[in-house]
Image (spheres, grey):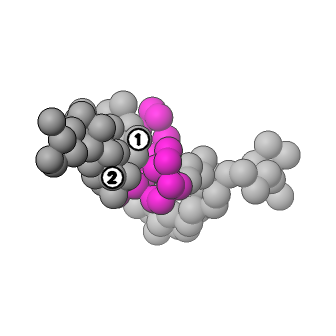
Amino acid sequence: MPRPALRSRSLRRVKVRTPGGRVVVRYERRKPGWARCALCGAILGGVPRERPTRLRKLAHTERRPERPYGGVICPRCLRRGLMDAVRLLKPPAGAA
């Protein structure tokens, strides 16, 4: 029986074959949930589902998309926000 700390289901069990041919059970921390858009809640593409310690080892461009608000809001919400911002700046056609 595993020791009490390893009985928790917050750790996932991974069966690994050792070089000696035995199959042992390793206990790993689970991956976090997917990154989601701050506005609509959609799953963000291009953002890896890793723990912060593993994310730190990735190159900066592998952590999130290289665009404004990349890794925070989805492309659809970004597009909508930019269009709204431009509409606020530009006066309507035909205005004096």
Task: Name the quarter where the C terminus is drawn.
Answer: top left
Residue in the image at 60% along x and 47% along y: 29
Residue interval drawn in magenta? 35-54
Q: Whole-percent x and y of residue 22?
A: 53, 67
78 or 43, nearer to the observer: 78
Q: Whole-percent x and y of residue 76?
A: 33, 57
Q: Nearer the viewer, mark 1 or mark 2?
A: 2
39 or 82, nearer to the observer: 82
Q: Main secondary structure of the magenta part?
A: loop
Badge 2, how many Cα within 10 Å: few under 14, some, many 20+?
Answer: few
User: Label for residue 80?
Assistant: 2
Tell me the CA gap for discs 1 and 2: 14 Å
User: Label for residue 1?
Assistant: none
Badge 1, how many Cα within 10 Å: few under 14, some, many 20+?
Answer: some
Picture layout, residue 23 above or below residue 96: below
> What amino acid type is highlighted by mark number 1?
Val
Upstream in sequence: badge 1 or badge 2: 1
Picture layout, residue 57 above or below residue 15: above
The residue beneath circle 1 is 72
Asked if residue 62 lies in the magenta stretch, the reply is no
Residue in the image at 80% along x and 53% along y: 7
Q: Whole-percent x and y of residue 2?
A: 79, 53
Q: Whole-percent x and y of residue 43?
A: 45, 59
Residue in the image at 47% along x and 59% along y: 42
